[in-house]
Amino acid sequence: MRAIYACDPARSRGRLVPEDESAFRSPFQRDRDRIIHASAFRRLKHKTQVFVEHEGDYFRTRLTHSLEVAQVARTMARALGLDEDLTEAVALAHDLGHPPFGHTGEDALAAAMAPYGGFDHNAQAIRIVTHLERHYAEFDGLNLTWETLEGIAKHNGPVVEPIPWALAACCDRHDLELHTHASAEAQVAALADDVAYNHHDLHDGLRAELFSTDELAELPILRGCFAEVDRLYPGLNYYRRRHEALRRFFGVLVEDVLAQSQARLAEIDPHSPEDVRAAGRPVVRFSDALFADLKEIRAFLFRRMYRAPKVVEMRAEVTKVVAELFPFFMAHPEELPKQWRKDVEAVAGDETALARIVSDYIAGMTDRFALQRHATLIGGMELPRVL
C-alpha cells in the first residue's frame, strides 16, 4: 500500500512536453522504460566502476552496478510504501552521466572543462535525458516526468551554488527546486547506490586479489558476518564462505537503512511528498553507528584498492587518454561523427559551446571506444593490468 508521503503518479507534476497518458503504464513506469531503452543506458555495459573494461569479465560495470542499485532500491521502496517505479527509474538513471573510466575519467574531463563551466556526472545525466538522447519526433531527450528529473538531479541532496551549467540549463526550462531535498523515492535510490557499491567493491577487490578474505574478516560489520557463517557452516570452502559473508553484509546495510528510515519518518511524520522535500534533512539514511563503520571500510578500500599501485598506474594511463582526446577534438572538430559536426556548425565561433559538444561526445564514450579513438587519432598505449 502506498504511503501518504509517497509520490503518486496520478499527481505527477508532468512532463515538459505534454503527452497523452498510457492506458496501461503509469508515468513513472514509462520513465523507467524510456531509461532502459536509452542509448546511454546500453553504453553503461562497457563503462567501468573501478577497473577498466579490458581487465576481465567478472568485475562490475556501470550497467551491472545500475541493475544492482535498482534491485536494492525497489526492495527498500516496497518496504517503505513508496512508489517502486519512480524509485527504480531514478536508480537506473543515476549513473548515465559518467564518462569512460569511472571517476578517473570524470576527474580528467572536469579538468579539461574547467575553463568552460566544468563537468559533473549528475548534471551530465540530466543533460542526457533532456537533450542528448535524440530519438523522439516531438522532443529532444526522454521527456521524463518532473519527479524523475528531480530525483536524478537531487538524489544526493539539495544542489548548492555553484550550480553545474548543464543542470542550470535544464532548470531554466523546468524548475527542479534544487534548494530542497528530493522525494523519499530518490533518497532511497541514493542509499541503494551506497549499499551496492560498498558491497561490490569488496567483492571486486577480493577477485582482483588486492586484499585477502582474512583481512576482510577483521573489518567492522564483516567481522560479525564471517563469524556467523563460520558458526553455521564450519569448514565451508573459501569462495562460498566469502559469498555468504558478503551477502550477510549486504543484508545488514539494507536492514539498517530501513530501520533508521522508518524511525526518521515516524519522527518527521510527513503527510505528503512535499513534506519530505521540506523536512530540511534526509529521511532515508544509515544509522550513525553503521555509517561510522562504513567509513572505516571505505578507508580500507581507499588504501588497498583505489590507491593500489596497479590501480594508480592504470588511472594515470586512462587520464592521459581523456586529457589528450579533449584538445584533439577541440582542434579537429571535423573528426567528430557526422551528427556531432552538425551541432558544431551551429555554434561556429563559440569556443565554450564547442567545448561542451566535445565534452558530451567524450562523456558518452565507453572505455573500449575511448581507447580505440585514442589509438586511431593520437597513438595507442599498452595499458597495464590489475590482474
Image (spheres, grey):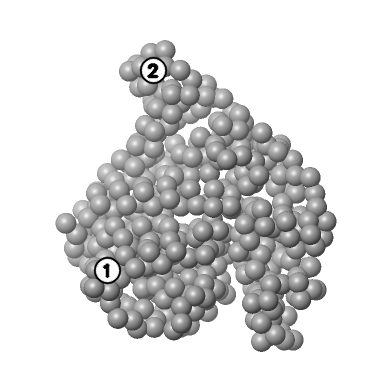
- Residue 342 is drawn in which quadrant? bottom right
Q: Would you name the residue on which mark 1 appears?
A: 26
The local crowd at label 1, few if under 14, some if 14 to 19, many if 20 or more residues have their Cα within 10 Å, is: some
What kind of residue is marked 2? Answer: Asp
Q: Is residue 162 visible to the viewer in this orientation of the structure?
A: no
Element type where label 1 sits in the image: loop
**Viewed as shown, does residue 33 lie left or right of 204?**
left
Residue nearest the viewer, comparing 372 with 48: 372
Q: Would you name the residue on which mark 2 appears?
A: 230
Q: CA distance from mark 2 to mark 1?
A: 46 Å
Between tags 2 and 1, which lies in front? 1
Residue sitting at x 44%, y 36%: 293
Residue nearest the viewer, comparing 343 with 263: 343
**x and y, in percent, of residue 177 in the image:** 40, 74
Q: Is residue 137 visible to the viewer in this orientation of the structure?
A: yes
Residue sitting at x 74%, y 48%: 316
What kind of residue is marked 1? Answer: Ser
